Amino acid sequence: MKLEAKEDFPPATENDARSGNSVAAIRKSILDHIHFSQARLPVMATCNDWYVALAYTVRDRMFGHWMNVVQAIADPQRKIVGYLSAEFLMGPHLGNALINLGIHDNTRAAVAQLGLNLDDLLAQEEEPGLGNGGLGRLAACYMDSLATLGVPALGYGIRYEFGIFSQEIRDGRQVEKTDKWLRLGNPWEIHRPELSCTVNFGGRTEWFHDERGRLRIRWIPNRVIKGVPYDTPIPAFRKDFIGILRLWKSEAVESFDFQAFNVGDYYKAVDEKVVSETVSKVLYPNDEPEIGKTLRLAQQYFFVSCALQDMIRVHLIRGKALDTFHESFAVQLNDTHPAIAVAELMRLLVDEHDMDWCEAWTITRNVFSYTNHTLLSEALEKWPLPFFGHLLPRHLEIIYEINHRFLEEVRRHAPGDDGLASRLSIIDEGGQKSIRMAHLASVAGHRINGVAELHTKLLSRTVLRDFHAIYPDRFVNVTNGVTPRRWMVLSNPKLAGLLESAIGDRWICRFEEEIEKIAPLADDPAFRNHWREVKRGNKADLAGLIHERTGNTVDPDTLFDVQVKRIHEYKRQHLNVLHIVTLYNRIRRNPNLDITPRTFIFGGKAAPGYAMAKLIIKLINDVGAVVNRDPDVAGRLKVVFFPNFNVKNGQMIYPAAELSEQISTAGKEASGTGNMKFSMNGALTIGTLDGANVEIREAVGPENFFLFGLTVDQVNDLWGRGYNPRRYYEENAQLREAVDLLYSGHFSPDHQARFVPLLDTLLNHDPYMLLADYQAYIDCQDQIAAAYRDQEHWTRISILNVARMGRFSSDRSIREYCKDIWRIRQGV
Ligand code: 7GP
């Protein structure tokens, strides 16, 4: 099939109001949209009206590119990536689109000619926070790289009406506010009702004879809802290409059930609509175990079914038969949230398209691959059988059949080893029977990947050990990456400008090859000076924002020591607090102590149901309140909690950081991606040998990375020998003093025992081994304080960190997925 749509459009000229990129064209386009799209007089237009008019202006400029991707999607020779993810943490679109389309400067000028400031319009955008943290943000970086590398891609997910809650801090505690990001509309999405799908739930299955007399199974659901897609274009960096983010909203099949309406039951009809719309209502924060959360499973099935129906539709439009579906699509399962896709594709092929089971299974195996993002057992998804069967009766049967055939293969492989079969089984028979989604994904996926070398190794030795034993070739590693477009060019224009003046701008899309060219400049004193000026400027900007958001005054000439990420015990924000309390004790003992002045900046959300994480937020704020007020400390220590850490705030924070805290217990952080963002922006890292820290350290050089703490093997060893945290407390005076001060209520005079649950956990169990790592952490921080005093040396290391981050561009990750997993050729 050949699309000729492009010829239908007049060729773009610089001054064309719809597509031109000149200042005059952009200004004209904004005014046109104020008039024709917003029906406003410029004098009456609000800031939001101008933002929307500008967003439409920018969107217009992507539509020409849209035709290129439609052509690629229609081309039967080209394989398409279907990236299935329950989360896409995109961050604001406007700034990124201006950068990628190459119209940032002209737009700023055009907006200025209208008497406006681009920064005010950028601030107007509500970010789509459709993700919790790393996993969702990774999906967003990957969409950027897929587009930039010219790989035709559809990101499939849920158009949550409410994204991740927004966080306020009141009296030092987290308060959650619903994220009404769609309140003022969303100019970036295109509603595509004509591509709607229906999705079934519940009911039962039955045997029947088809028209050819064969005995078959059909699903008689008791609920049907509609999925309506909304498309958001994701622009490539300076290429005529985009990716498509296709998010599904749930709706009632008919807005009113007329039968109910006719018999007078108006409210039942409306009820139906409300229940159907609930499916895409809200993003689940990743907290308590999911067992029993029907809505969560319904969400997963809902978007996966819509996505697969959509992919099959695209494949058939290409004029191809269904038995070649795997030649059209490579489908990535972003963790197990979309793993039900395995059973759904089998159902669509076998039940709906009348395909033979074995043929359908071969296709399914070829189509899917699975990325694991965590080893934490509490995050491994399991669905109790009766509950699963109640919502998805046909899928339960299909999973039984997949499992039956799989276990036969296992028994052939290892006759008599029933232990192996039960450990590998998709059904967990121990206790409450349940479906292990990671097993379903691993049985079907032709490739299983972890997200950092260490993580992939641990995955194949622990959580998926038995799968690795029987299918070693399925396992590959793809270390995560982040996009330098958003995380450097957009967030850190000062640094990008300096880099451009030194090595040109090829590094933006050829990061791996080009960025190392700045390494020799580490020896150039003038360049180091510029480098420091950039950082100083970013710190001053952040200081302004901190004052605005928290009322705290911070000094941009202190060391900015930053830990921003979700709040979790394994990430050990409270180890960072123990360091602060230790420094505080040293100053109290000797008020004239000469220490390196620091500003400790924290940020991150705690899952609403995770009491200990919430207590850690309160701890940071309570310690901050006392330390910041103490006259003895006078400008040497400051502690701030930056509220509502999200993509937008991250863009201000990473560029201003000098020290990046990556201090998880070894073996717990799958990869981390914040670690990469910090380092790309010139922060030095204090970190454990965990996740991608290991590879970052190798890349930047061990002498340019502050390493501390137990290794994975040492952690395991210590558990094996019997870990007694209290012994560390008893034997370490500095540690004891810090812990005792916290117990004493010094930081919580209004409630002396506030932190007892946290402190008791540390002394009695300490599941994340803070006390075992405490002294090493303090020693390492002392070294850092000393190193910071030699600013020339510090700057050298900072430059070398950036120069050696080439591997950590998401472009490199996506190239690896294309080659080793999707078997896709790159486009542009
Ligand atoms: C995160 C991991 O914790 C982080 O280490 C990794 O960098 C990131 O994924 C991207 O791979 N995991 C999640 O965000 C998550 O929700 C549960 O994992 C499945």
Image (cartoon, rainbow, N blue to C red):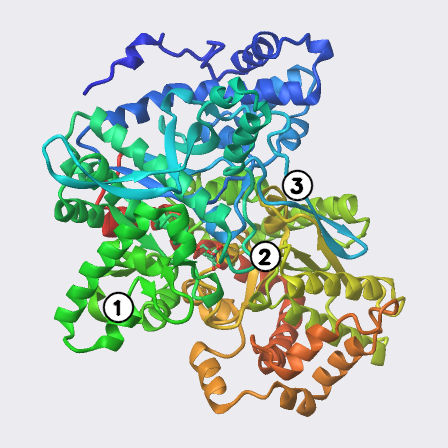
Circle 1 crowding by C-alpha within 10 Å: few under 14, some 14–19, many from 20? some
The reply, left or right, for residue 2 in relation to residue 569 is: left
Q: Residue extending furthest front? A: 263
Which residue is tagged 3? 178
Task: Report the amino acid beneath label 2.
Answer: Arg
Whether residue 738 is situated above or below residue 329 in the rendered picture: below
For marks 3 and 2, give the CA distance: 18 Å
Q: Which of marks 1 and 2 is nearer the N terminus?
A: 1
For marks 1 and 3, give the CA distance: 42 Å
Q: What is the secondary structure assignment of the residue under circle 2?
A: loop
Q: Where is residue 590 in the image (x, y as percent from the top left)?
A: 84, 79
The reply, left or right, for residue 486 in relation to residue 513 is: right
Whether residue 497 is situated above or below residue 525 in the rendered picture: above
Q: Can residue 371 be seen in this view?
A: yes
Q: What is the secondary structure assignment of the residue under circle 3?
A: loop
Q: Position of residue 565 (x, y in %)?
A: 58, 56
Q: Which of 383 and 823 is in front in this view?
A: 383
Which residue is tagged 1? 468
Tell us which disc is closer to us: 3 or 2.
3
Q: Which of 566 and 150 is in front in this view?
A: 566
